[in-house]
Amino acid sequence: MMTPFPWAEAIGFGLGVLRLPPAAFWRMTPRELAFAIAAVRGPQPGACSRATLSALMTQFPDTPRQAEDAPHG
């Protein structure tokens, strides 16, 4: 299923953060807006690869806590 374009966030960022006049905002391509957003926000971490995720899962497994480690209450 495709995720719809986040118009509310795009318009809010373009008009509110970038302070673009509406006419300038609507003339921008989505790619131009994405570059402008990236310039303001800075580099954002991307999703890790499946290999990186597998390595992290091996290094930090989700294991049930031992009875003696569980909080008493």
Image (cartoon, helix red, strand yellow):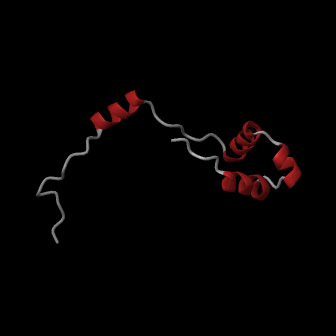
Above or below residue 29? Residue 72 is: below
Choose top left, top right, bottom left or bottom right for residue 71. Answer: bottom left
Camera-side residue of 67 and 19: 19
Q: Position of residue 64 (x, y in %)?
A: 18, 50
Which percent across, then down, holds residue 53?
A: 38, 34
Residue 36 place in picture, x, y as percent: 75, 43
Q: Quadrant of residue 28?
A: top right
Percent coordinates x, y for residue 57 in the rendering:
31, 37
Task: Tell which of 32 and 43 is nearer to you.
Answer: 32
Q: Residue furthest top?
A: 51
Residue 46 located left or right of residue 31:
left
Judged left or right of residue 71, residue 40 is right
Q: Looking at the image, which residue is at 54% across and 39% down? A: 45
Labels in figure, total = 0
**Residue at the location (55% across, 41% down)?**
2
Q: Nearer the viewer, residue 35 or 4?
A: 4
